[in-house]
Image: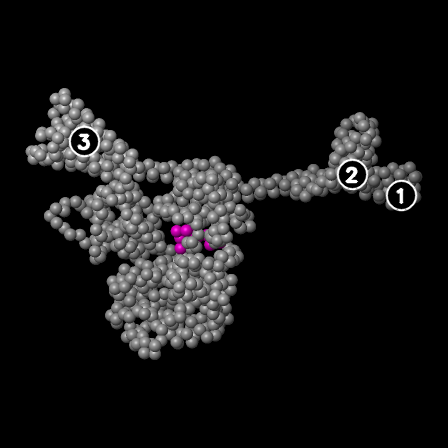
């Protein structure tokens, strides 16, 4: 029976949680095209490892390998793939859960850049491999030069094809070993022709000898570059070159090429890499396709190791120049599409303005040969949302302007004054309404109303050509003024959003400093995330054993039902985040089918809690919100770490106090122990040496003295044992009803000899008075009190 990828048991299996387990090693067999022999070399290495005594398993192997490589699979243990139906097609995938449970020393996973099916835990196979490495399993895998993200544009320019399945460069660069599998392009073409003649399944690539030679050169160069990028010990680490590479994110299709170029340049200069997104006032009004493209480019920059930064403003050139100045950027990488220049083009381009604002920057322009997209209308009237309320405001203000103009005309004021009233009305409409459509309509209607009511001949439209210039100027002034007012209002809204988010972050830091206790810290963090994201949040605290405990729910609406976040699959995602210390869930590449985004609240060495933010069909958080989410959770992690350290310190201080109490107690009773012991040993010596000469009265006196000292020691030992049990929390009380008279008489019968010189009496209002108590302990208490009283008072 086939096993489905959506099997919840696979998600809920018990992962191995030993944090001290060493990471597995990744070995990549690297080639420039399919058919050079990567799989054959990988299987050959697996046989050598097995002969050396290693536990080797074939986790997944593509079915279209050559017969020579297929024969090498004999003698190696093979795992069964997971089979699932998708759109009526039976698909085979690598069984990650079975591999983790089998836990061999070395596992072979072919085709690292493969994209998994929707039902898989991870979106990409390299994420499966990362989990295997974290579990301490060594992995052998295969990669082509076309699979590297940063080389996608270069490969596309060579072959004319865009490879859809790619891996981030950090996977390749962080591999413990890369073995280049090389073959002359002529020999590769002959091998492929022979395979075709033998009707063997071979890669579908059909490149020319020239293309294969270019790919081979690219693979050789990339392998050599990787050698220069191999991490070294901190003591031997080479210093940074001081270069800081900056690229800008946009919704242009060519932006992906710009990002890859900037990433390669940052690697070449061994410098920092930052991707800046300038959010303009009209960003939220852009079409959905453009916003999705920006999100895709942002994810690409993150995969290539860029630090994401966000700036706000209506002039990208100023924001880029200011950010570069503050952050110490040395080089800026920008994209430029081919533009048709005419004699009417007078506006400076972004590159020209940036060159003027930051002359010290090195600006690199990456051309785009693809056809530029048609620009959308600057006003985007089709995107405006109609509002009856705003329409009423517009008509009301225009009516008021018309009435005011008629009044002024009756008093003999010239039409120029009436013109200014309508321009003022357009400004008021821009302020009072939302959307450019009302500003544009008010500008048009202002001109028509002015022409109809206040120009001769009256109550006609455009009948006097002499007023045409006045109408045009009035329309242009109205349009410009309304546009400036609308833009200012959008900038105010944008600034308010940024100020609110920043205020939430600062408020979080202040509240966390005052919070005491783990529950209070988590409650403050959840409340701030509710305010920032306007989404429901839940937290999974982690106990001292490192396991998740019952979640704490923080719904945005008190009446909201959050049971969908408590399903086994959702809890499995939280458990995965706890074990792997990585984000998972909705909007990520791991368990993307869940309803929440799961993020780790990290301490210094381990995960302190897991936060879940409800997504469930809503729009994804933007980059700035994600940065704030991470910052808030980091603040929470620091607060939880501090709280844990305080608890540990208090525990150590309590232990130290107990040790000091024991030491002081031993010092205080050392003298009291010597006195009765000396008396007992002395009296016993007298009885042993002079028994024949001592009379009976003297013997009885000595016996009584020995008995009293022994009883005193017994009482002292009982007191010490009681104190120890109380300190350790092991005191168990045996509560029973007892007669008080019997308890007092029992205590008085075991007093020390000093009590005989005192008059002791027990006065009870009722001889049958009873109380619930532990009689043994109460007798001991009464004995101690009376003995102290008789010891420190005169006879």
**Above or below, comparing residue 711 to residue 123 in the picture:** above
User: Helix, strand or loop at disc 3?
Assistant: helix
State the separation of the CA atoms marked 1 and 3: 130 Å
**Above or below, comparing residue 527 to residue 546 in the picture:** above
- Neighbours of disc 1 within 10 Å: few (<14), some (14-19), many (20+): few
Q: Is residue 133 among the parts visible in the rendering?
A: no
Q: Which residue is mark 2?
A: 712
Q: Which residue is mark 1?
A: 690
Q: Which mark is residue 778?
A: none
| Residue 49: image location, x then y, percent | 46, 70
User: Helix, strand or loop at disc 2?
Assistant: helix
- Neighbours of disc 3 within 10 Å: few (<14), some (14-19), many (20+): many
User: Helix, strand or loop at disc 1?
Assistant: loop
Query: Would you say residue 581 sits in the magenta stretch?
Result: yes
Query: Residue at coordinates 25% horizontally, 41% vertically from top-left?
Result: 314
Q: Is residue 393 among the parts visible in the rendering?
A: yes
- Neighbours of disc 2 within 10 Å: few (<14), some (14-19), many (20+): many
């Amino acid at each position: 029976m086939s096993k489905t990828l959506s099997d919840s048991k696979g998600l809920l299996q018990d992962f191995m949680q030993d944090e001290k387990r060493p990471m597995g090693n990744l070995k990549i067999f690297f080639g420039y095209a399919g058919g050079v022999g990567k799989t054959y070399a990988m299987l050959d290495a697996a046989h050598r490892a097995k002969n050396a005594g290693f536990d080797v398993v074939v986790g997944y192997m593509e079915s279209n390998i050559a017969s020579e490589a297929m024969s090498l699979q004999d003698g190696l243990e093979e795992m069964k793939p997971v089979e699932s139906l998708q759109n009526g097609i039976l698909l085979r995938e690598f069984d990650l859960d079975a591999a983790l449970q089998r836990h061999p020393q070395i596992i072979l996973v072919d085709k690292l850049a493969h994209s998994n099916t929707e039902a898989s835990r991870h979106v990409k196979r390299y994420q499966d491999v990362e989990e295997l490495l974290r579990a301490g399993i060594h992995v052998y895998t295969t990669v082509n030069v076309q699979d590297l993200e940063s080389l996608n544009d270069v490969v596309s320019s060579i072959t004319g094809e865009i490879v859809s399945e790619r891996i981030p460069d950090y996977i390749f660069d962080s591999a413990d070993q890369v073995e280049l599998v090389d073959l002359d392009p002529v020999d590769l073409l002959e091998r492929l022709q022979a395979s075709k003649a033998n009707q063997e399944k071979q890669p579908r690539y059909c490149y020319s000898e020239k293309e294969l030679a270019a790919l081979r050169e690219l693979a050789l160069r990339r392998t050599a570059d990787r050698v220069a990028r191999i991490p070294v010990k901190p003591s031997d680490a080479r210093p940074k070159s001081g270069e800081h590479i900056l690229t800008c994110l946009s919704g242009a299709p060519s932006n992906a090429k710009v990002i890859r170029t900037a990433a390669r340049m940052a690697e070449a200069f061994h410098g920092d890499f930052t991707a800046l997104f300038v959010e303009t006032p009209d960003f939220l009004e852009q079409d959905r396709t453009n916003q999705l493209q920006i999100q895709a480019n942002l994810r690409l920059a993150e995969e290539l190791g860029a630090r994401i930064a966000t700036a706000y403003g209506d002039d990208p050139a100023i924001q880029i120049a200011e950010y570069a100045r503050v952050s110490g950027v040395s080089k800026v990488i920008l994209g430029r599409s081919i533009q048709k220049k005419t004699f009417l083009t007078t506006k400076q381009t972004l590159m020209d303005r940036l060159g003027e604002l930051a002359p010290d920057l090195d600006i690199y322009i990456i051309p785009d040969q693809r056809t530029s997209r048609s620009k959308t209308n600057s006003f985007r009237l089709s995107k405006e949302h109609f509002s009856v309320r705003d329409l009423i405001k517009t008509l009301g203000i225009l009516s008021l302007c018309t009435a005011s103009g008629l009044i002024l005309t009756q008093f003999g004021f010239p039409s120029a004054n009436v013109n200014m009233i309508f321009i003022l009305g357009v400004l008021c409409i821009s302020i009072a309404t939302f959307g450019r459509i009302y500003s544009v309509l008010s500008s048009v209607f202002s001109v028509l109303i002015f022409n109809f009511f206040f120009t001769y001949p009256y109550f006609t439209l455009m009948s006097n050509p002499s007023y045409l210039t006045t109408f045009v100027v009035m329309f242009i002034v109205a349009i410009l003024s309304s546009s400036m007012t609308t833009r200012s209002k959008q900038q105010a809204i944008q600034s308010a959003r940024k100020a609110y988010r920043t205020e939430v972050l600062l408020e979080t830091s202040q509240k966390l400093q005052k919070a005491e206790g783990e529950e209070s810290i988590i409650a403050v963090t959840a409340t701030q995330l509710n305010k920032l994201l306007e989404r429901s949040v839940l937290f999974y605290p982690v106990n001292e054993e490192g396991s998740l405990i019952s979640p704490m729910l923080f719904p945005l609406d008190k009446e909201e039902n959050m049971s969908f976040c408590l399903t086994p699959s959702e809890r499995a995602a939280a458990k995965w985040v706890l074990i792997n210390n990585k984000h998972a869930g909705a909007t990520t590449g791991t368990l993307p089918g869940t309803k929440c985004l799961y993020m780790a609240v990290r301490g210094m060495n381990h995960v302190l809690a897991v936060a879940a933010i409800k997504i469930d069909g809503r729009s994804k958080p933007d980059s700035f919100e994600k940065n704030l989410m991470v910052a808030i959770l980091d603040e929470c992690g620091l607060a939880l770490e501090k709280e844990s350290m305080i608890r540990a310190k208090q525990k150590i201080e309590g232990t130290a106090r107990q040790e000091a109490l024991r030491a002081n107690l031993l010092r205080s009773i050392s003298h009291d122990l010597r006195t009765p012991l000396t008396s007992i040993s002395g009296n016993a010596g007298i009885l042993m040496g002079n028994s024949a000469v001592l009379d009976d009265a003297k013997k009885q006196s000595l016996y009584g003295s020995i008995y009293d000292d022994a009883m005193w020691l017994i009482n002292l030992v009982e007191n010490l044992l009681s104190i120890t049990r109380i300190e350790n929390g092991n005191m168990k009380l045996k509560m029973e009803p007892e007669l008080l008279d019997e308890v007092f008489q029992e205590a008085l019968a075991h007093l020390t000899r000093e009590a005989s010189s005192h008059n002791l009496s027990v006065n009870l209002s009722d001889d049958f008075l009873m109380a619930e108590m532990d009689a043994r302990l109460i007798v001991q208490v009464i004995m101690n009190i009376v003995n102290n009283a008789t010891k420190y008072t005169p006879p």
